[in-house]
Amino acid sequence: MVKKAICLISGGLDSCVASWIAKDKGFQIYALTFSYEQLHTKELQCAQDIAKQLPIQEHVVIPIPFQKFCKSSLLQNSEMPLEANTLDTIGSVIPSTYVPARNTIFLSIALGYAESIDAHSIFIGANAVDYSGYPDCRPHYFSAFQKMADLATKRGIQGRSIEIETPLLHMSKAMIIQTGVKLQAPLAKTWSCYQGNTYACGRCDSCLLRLKGFQDAGVHDPLTYQEYPVWYTQ
Amino acid sequence: MVKKAICLISGGLDSCVASWIAKDKGFQIYALTFSYEQLHTKELQCAQDIAKQLPIQEHVVIPIPFQKFCKSSLLQNSEMPLEANTLDTIGSVIPSTYVPARNTIFLSIALGYAESIDAHSIFIGANAVDYSGYPDCRPHYFSAFQKMADLATKRGIQGRSIEIETPLLHMSKAMIIQTGVKLQAPLAKTWSCYQGNTYACGRCDSCLLRLKGFQDAGVHDPLTYQEYPVWYTQ
């Protein structure tokens, strides 16, 4: 019997590649996206476009009103400014873009969904290398979530663990991009910039990490940027 | 400095008593309620009424569209029937009223809220005695959630754990009711019945457990029931 997997698809590059890994492993895919009052809706549109490229069973989009209970510069109308970082300072402290308990909330809803459709796995594109400043992107966190999930669910107590799969956890951005290219993931449809403009800004943390990744991978980034950092070779 | 606590208030008896325990311990209370497409809105109204009796800082009500990803007889328009149990069969199997990952989803959102307002504790009225059939009401589950939460949050990794407080976990329903009476919790404003009619049905699992609890506690249940089980002495 084909195993089912929930794939968390944000519209970004990492979750796109993680979903193509799930596809490559032969899972039957159920796409899950959260509309959580993030800075812009462009990434939601990208999530839709990415999901359409997959052989999915369904694509569920769940709204969660994060602004009612959470503070982060990554939410709409936030009073917290987005910091301007360089590649050297990214990851050294917990950044203002940290959204409290975001991965825990997303994985919990994915867990309920997985239990309801009897899915074997949940794929999340979390990465511990670039986002070492986020507590909920570290390997220990995911191990602890797995243990909790095994006790929280009917499947878990029956010994049929719902597996939290983090295939990108220890990959560099360059490796993620190379994996995406190899699996023919639609990287051109992914969006990383914290702004939702026509072109990616080329200045925010997320643009810097992405461009550095493409540069290191020796791959051309199909997106157009408003400007490029001085170290980037077009 | 006064410590802050998030109190999960459902409109039911247990979460009401758990909130009064938090109040009794001197916490500054932030009430949190979920509108999750449960069977009826009566319990949401009860949650509002209960929260108004507390000295709360605010009452946040979060909608979550559970029907988009979850199956349970406790959700609106469910195709799963509510079983008719007797006191003997309750708790022997996982009942159809089990909502996959519900406590995990609720606690995760509470965790994000707690981290955002720098709260010390989260109070949840979970009980392992009456609901032994629910995987996410057992002590091991809450310990595992605590460990995960300590790794998931900024507070956790700074050694300032957000404590998941389950004061009712090992209490019988009679003890919960006696505690509520002692702390002057507004038990008359709580609702337990799976139906949202004017009077409680007196037949569903939840009514049976409640009436048994009041009977064992030697306390009069202030609610009016449509009918009473034969073993109940009015």
Image (cartoon, coloured by chain):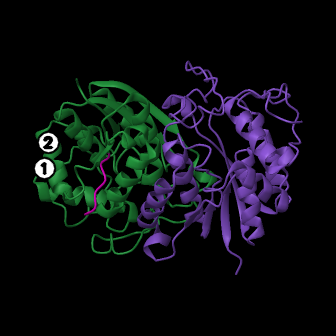
Chain colours: A purple, B green
| Marker count (numbered) | 2
In the image, is residue B127 part of the stretch drawn in magenta?
A: yes
Q: Which residues are magenta?
A: B124-129
Q: Where does residue A35 sit, x and y in percent of width and height?
A: 66, 39
Q: CA distance from mark 2 to mark 1?
A: 9 Å
Q: Is residue B72 left or right of residue A74?
A: left
Chain letter for the residue marked with disc 2 in the picture: B
Q: Where does residue A121 sit, x and y in percent of width and height?
A: 61, 66
Q: Is residue A201 placed above or below A130 in the rendered structure?
A: above
Q: Main secondary structure of the magenta part?
A: loop
Q: Is residue A187 placed above or below A28 in the rendered structure?
A: above
**Mark 1 lies on residue:** B219
SS under mark 1: loop
Q: Where does residue A200 sit, x and y in percent of width and height?
A: 81, 30
The image quadrant where one finds the N terminus of chain A is bottom right
Instruction: Tell whether label 1 touches label 2 (CB within 8 Å).
Output: yes
Q: Quadrant of residue A201?
A: top right
Chain letter for the residue marked with disc 1 in the picture: B
**Mark 2 lies on residue:** B181
Q: Where does residue A183 sit, x and y in percent of width and height?
A: 82, 62
Q: Amino acid at mark 1?
A: Val
Q: Is residue B10 visible?
A: no
The image quadrant where one finds the C terminus of chain A is top right
Quick one: which residue is furthest to the bottom in this view?
Answer: A1
